Image: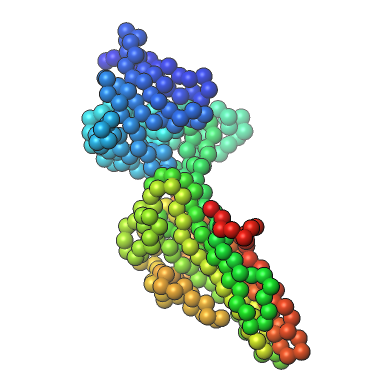
């Protein structure tokens, strides 16, 4: 058996070259500077292979210099290989972009300070930073959050640099009077450039009252519903039963809220939304049967989800530990309160978040 020797860089402890028993260089890796791993390509036996990764940073394919796919890889959430095609030598597979080095003989991953064993989903040695702190489990891997967390140092779990945010694209909220509509539009955006699939689920909390002028103190009614955005390539929404992939750079879907200050009435309309993106797993795939198109969400004050799949109740795992499948979350709100009764006609109180800070659309 040939013994391998490695040359590590001095900054991020990345393997940048491999040598054989004669100390002849056999492999050279190119990587993004200033980050753990960041593997881009390998040059081995006179041929160059280029890495293609998913949202987590796991290698899903290798291509040659002519852009032909030579190898494909699929692993489960814990790094156990499910399938592999091709014959290229490649130690950077599951979490390969972060520099996880796969040993084909043992099936383990060398991750700088420690060795990770995917068959039992644990480190093979205790965390040296927590041994003296009486930590409950010093062998646990990324707090059991492998679909969204990595540990490129072997010492400190961290989430991937992807996120969900909400931006206002337009607003018509100011200088309103009784009888006027106020409205705002948002985009829900996944920031990141990898491919993954899943569900945007928005919990919408409504507080609503349209009261006669002789009963302005009547308490508003409150209810909640959950709506689902399944999204496809190039920003097109798809049917709930289609398997879709978010592809490309920043991916967005649109949402909006509107309400009117009704003449000769007093009341309020408050709609708060919390949007979460869940990776599609065996657990979250129940959304396909849980959400019914256009059935729920229709309520007081002409609230409607349109043709979106929705449900009056949360999915079973919504309030449970989200560590396995929750990718990211963000919140938005819209409210309009008014008293447009005769001899009163107070200026409507309107607010929304997030709001545009300028008159131009935000990116």
Q: Is residue 318 above or below residue 194?
A: below
Q: Residue at x 64, y 58 (%)?
A: 358
Nearer the observer, 138 or 25: 25
Q: Residue at x 48, y 63 (%)?
A: 254
Quick check: 139 left or right of 132? left
Give the residue at the far top of this rendering. Answer: 22
Tally the marks.
Answer: 0
Residue 55 visible (yes or no): yes
Nearer the observer, 201 or 281: 201
Q: Residue at x 76, y 86 (%)?
A: 344
Q: Residue at x 50, y 30 (%)?
A: 35
Q: Position of residue 324 (x, y in %)?
A: 45, 49
Q: Is residue 21 above or below residue 273?
A: above
Find residue 51 and report its image quarter. top left
Find residue 104 and report its image quarter. top left
Quick check: 329 left or right of 196? right
Residue 105 visible (yes or no): no
Q: Position of residue 218 (x, y in %)?
A: 68, 85
Q: Position of residue 40 (x, y in %)?
A: 39, 31
Asked which colour scheme the image uses, the reply is rainbow
Q: Quadrant of the N terminus?
A: top left
């Amino acid at each position: 058996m040939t013994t391998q020797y490695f040359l590590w860089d001095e900054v991020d402890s990345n393997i940048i070259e491999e040598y054989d028993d004669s100390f002849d260089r056999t492999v050279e890796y190119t990587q993004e500077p200033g980050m753990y791993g960041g593997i881009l390509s390998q040059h081995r036996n006179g041929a160059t292979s280029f890495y293609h990764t998913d949202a987590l940073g796991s290698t899903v394919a290798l291509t040659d210099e002519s852009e032909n796919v030579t190898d494909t890889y699929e692993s489960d959430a814990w790094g156990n290989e499910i399938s592999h095609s091709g014959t290229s030598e490649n130690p950077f597979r599951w979490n390969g972009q972060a520099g996880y080095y796969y040993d084909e003989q043992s099936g383990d991953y060398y991750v700088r300070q420690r060795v990770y064993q995917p068959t039992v989903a644990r480190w093979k040695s205790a965390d040296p930073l927590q041994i003296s702190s009486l930590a409950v489990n010093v062998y646990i891997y990324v707090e059991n959050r492998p679909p969204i967390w990595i540990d490129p140092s072997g010492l400190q779990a961290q989430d991937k640099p992807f996120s969900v945010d909400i931006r206002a694209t337009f607003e018509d909220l100011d200088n309103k009077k009784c009888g006027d509509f106020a409205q705002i539009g948002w985009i829900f955006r996944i920031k990141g450039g990898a491919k993954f699939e899943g569900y945007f689920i928005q919990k919408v909390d409504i507080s609503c009252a349209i009261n006669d002028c002789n009963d302005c103190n009547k308490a508003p009614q409150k209810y909640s519903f959950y709506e689902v955005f399944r999204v496809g390539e190039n920003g097109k929404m798809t049917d709930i039963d289609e398997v879709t992939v978010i592809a490309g750079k920043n991916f967005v879907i649109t949402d909006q809220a509107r309400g009117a200050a009704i003449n000769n009435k007093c009341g309020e309309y408050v709609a708060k939304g919390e949007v979460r993106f869940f990776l599609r797993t065996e657990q979250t795939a129940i959304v396909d049967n849980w959400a019914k198109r256009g059935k729920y969400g229709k309520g007081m004050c002409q609230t409607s989800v349109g043709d979106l799949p929705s449900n009056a109740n949360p999915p079973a795992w919504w309030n449970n530990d989200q560590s396995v499948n929750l990718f990211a979350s963000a919140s938005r709100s819209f409210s309009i309160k008014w008293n447009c009764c005769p001899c009163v006609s107070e200026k409507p109180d309107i607010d929304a978040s997030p709001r545009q800070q300028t008159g131009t659309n935000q990116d």
